[in-house]
Image (spheres, rainbow, N blue to C red):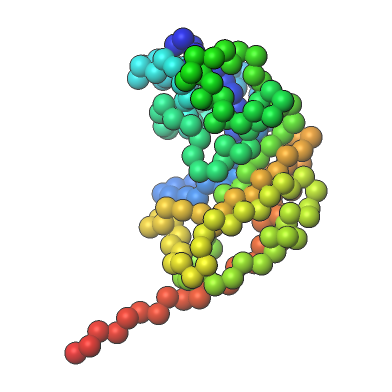
Amino acid sequence: MVGGQLRILALFDKPDPLEGPYFEETLYITPSRLSLDTQSAIYESTAKAASAIGLQEGPVHAELRVNDDGPWIIEIAGRSIGGLCAATLKFGIDTSLEELILRQAFGMDISSFKRESIASGVMMIPIPEAGLLKEVQGCEEAEELPLIEKAEITAKLNNLLTPLPEGDSYLGFIFARGPSPALVEDALRKAHAKLRFKIAPELPLLKNH
């Protein structure tokens, strides 16, 4: 938000089917492949929602569902994108989203900063099963694939993994950049297929009687 006006820095598609009652978010891909009319409707809905809750300056994060009746606001807040996902965004020559937010906070002009022209995306690596993470293989193989920038495992070895709906974290993140959203999505899926996880079951503690 700049002076009470919404400015779109990036619009991400989530190409995986996200069906309830709960689901894991996996892929964020930008720029959007939705029609320009749909993107315009998303902008209008988000701008109205931001104004309705009194947002005037600073970052805005909004989540929407889109169906035949148009866009529907799921969440909107005065915050940046979560986790390490901000690494998908670069502005100007090589400005990060965090730097852009700080520039605005210090009253500096950010109107000239545009998102890079190429497509980018991130996969939030889902937890396949509950248990103790013992080993991760395939990260180097994944990073050798075209368009893949990094495969970063943030879960710690020998820590307990808890999948949804009880869990609230991911195994890590895979980042990619390329000439089109479709190619970025394909690269992320291929990189994810290279990863192999050894997860040991958690042994229950026996109570003394």
Number of marks: 0
Image spot of residue 79 (x, y percent): 44, 30
Q: Residue at x 46, y 67 (%)?
A: 159
Residue 153: which quarter of the image?
bottom right
- Residue in view at x 69 percent, y 37 percent: 120
Whether residue 14 is visible, yes or no, is no
Which percent across, then down, holds residue 1?
48, 17
Question: Split into 4 quadrants, where in the image is the C terminus?
Answer: bottom left
In the rendered view, does 195 fall on the left or right side of 23?
right
Q: In this view of the protein, which residue sits in the foreground, 160 or 104?
A: 104
**Residue at the spot x=72%, y=46% of the render?**
149
Give the residue furthest to the front. 106
Residue 208 occupies which quadrant of the picture? bottom left
Q: Is residue 140 left or right of residue 207?
A: right
Residue 19, can we see it? yes
Residue drawn at 49 percent across, 70 percent down: 158
Task: Give x and y (percent) for residue 43.
Answer: 54, 19
The furthest residue to the bottom: 209
| Residue 92 % position (x, y) | 69, 23
As drawn, which residue projects farthest toward the left?
209
In this rendering, the answer to whether 36 lies above or below 22 is: above
* In the displayed structure image, the side of residue 145 where residue 205 appears, left or right: left
Q: Is residue 119 above or below residue 149?
A: above
